[in-house]
Every structure is written in structure tokens, then in C-alpha cells.
Image (spheres, rainbow, N blue to C red):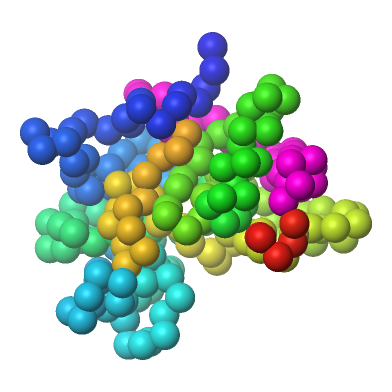
Amino acid sequence: MREILGRRRRLLSQRKDGKPELISAALTFATRWQWPVLPGVTAGSRGRSRCGCPDPDCTVPGAHPFDPGLLAATTDARMVRWWWTNRPAAPIILATGGRAPCAVSLPALPAARALAALDRGGMRLGPVVASPTRWALLVRPYSMEQLGELLYAKDFVPGSLRFHGEGGYLALPPSETGQGTVRWERAPLPGSASPWLPDVEAVVDAVVDALTRTGVSAPEL
């Protein structure tokens, strides 16, 4: 049976209005899956597309930690409850690396084409997180040395690929950020003790190959 289901499968319980509760999602990530999380910055008062942080030119509005800082990420249920009880609309930020998942992300349109090509080729993927601008493929934790060797061995890696490893972060569903809603494009099976994750080498090789075969040029990325 496939580990990952389509976008219609919802991971977490729904409110009556159909919107998953952020605190419930954060507790699932932290306590069941042992993914360290912390609250992100909420939208600024001058509009949804503006960030609540001091940087007027923030490139990831709402989709990053600010106060507390990234090092505060935790799997402690009491801390998670306290954070989202006091900040119920705060985005959920995953601190990537260490024992937590890492990720490879790319712009949304090339990502959609790459995933379709990988599906046709029978590639097994882990969870995929989608925002309106970028999609992120979750992978097993990797070291910076491992990533460096992987990239050095390749003739070409699209410059738009981003790697969320040790010391990085990623907004998780069902967060609302300044760039829009974060959702599962490929959701883990409901009730998963811990979602299955592929190796970063397999994902990078497959994504680069899929982008090449589907004719996605560097400027489009």
C-alpha cells in the first residue's frame, strides 16, 4: 500500500467549519512524530502579505520564527500547548535537521510538473508540503557534509532548489502565512506513528532528472 495519499486525504481532525486546528496539528507533530516545532511570526497589521517581524522586506512573511528563536523548537507538549493557547493563529514552524526531517524545496509550478513525472516513473515520495509559491519534499535527516558531497558530484543542480537542513526551518500545514495557506500536497497516512521519508540523494536525483525530462528551463525555476 502506498505510504502517501493524495491531497484530498486530510491528516488531522477538522473543525465544523472545515479548518484543522493549529494546536492539534502542532501537538501531533511534536508529540506523536517527535518533530521539534515552534510558532512562526503572524501577519503584520498592514496586510496579510506583510510580516509581523521588523524586516519590511521579509521574503518569507509569517513563515519563519522570530520570538522565540529557532533554538526554542521543542517536542514538549506543555510548551506547545502554551504557545498556541496564547498565539492560536501562529504558523507552525518545523526546525529541520538533527533528528527531524529535512526538506528539498522548489517553485510550485516546476514542483507540480516534477511530481507528476515522478508519479509516472513510480518514484516513492514522502510527505510534500505546498505553499502558493513553493513546494517542499520532506526527506530523512542529512548532514551538511552529505549534502555537499551530493551536490559536488552532480553536473547540474537548478539554482532554485533550496535545502532545509540543520539549522533550517519550514512552515507546516495548516499554517496561514503572508504568502497564503500551507497545505499537504502529499499527506502522511492518518494515524502514522512516524511518516516514512526517502533519502535526500534519491529525491535530488529524481527531481533534477524529472525537471530535465519535462523541459523546465533554468529561467522558469
Q: Classify 9 as above or below 219.
A: above
* Residue sticking out furthest to the top: 1
The N terminus is located in which quarter? top right
> Is 168 displayed left or right of 53 in the figure?
right
Foreground pick, 111 / 43: 111
Magenta segment range?
Answer: 187-216
> Is 82 displayed left or right of 220 in the figure?
left
Q: Residue at x 41, y 24 (%)?
A: 189
Residue 173 placed where, x, y %?
Answer: 35, 47
> Is 75 displayed left or right of 17 in the figure?
right
Foreground pick, 113 / 141: 113
Q: Classify 34 as above or below 71.
A: above
Residue 19 placed where, x, y %?
Answer: 18, 41
Foreground pick, 100 / 169: 169
Q: Residue at x 27, y 33 (%)?
A: 12
Residue 221 image-quadrant placement = bottom right
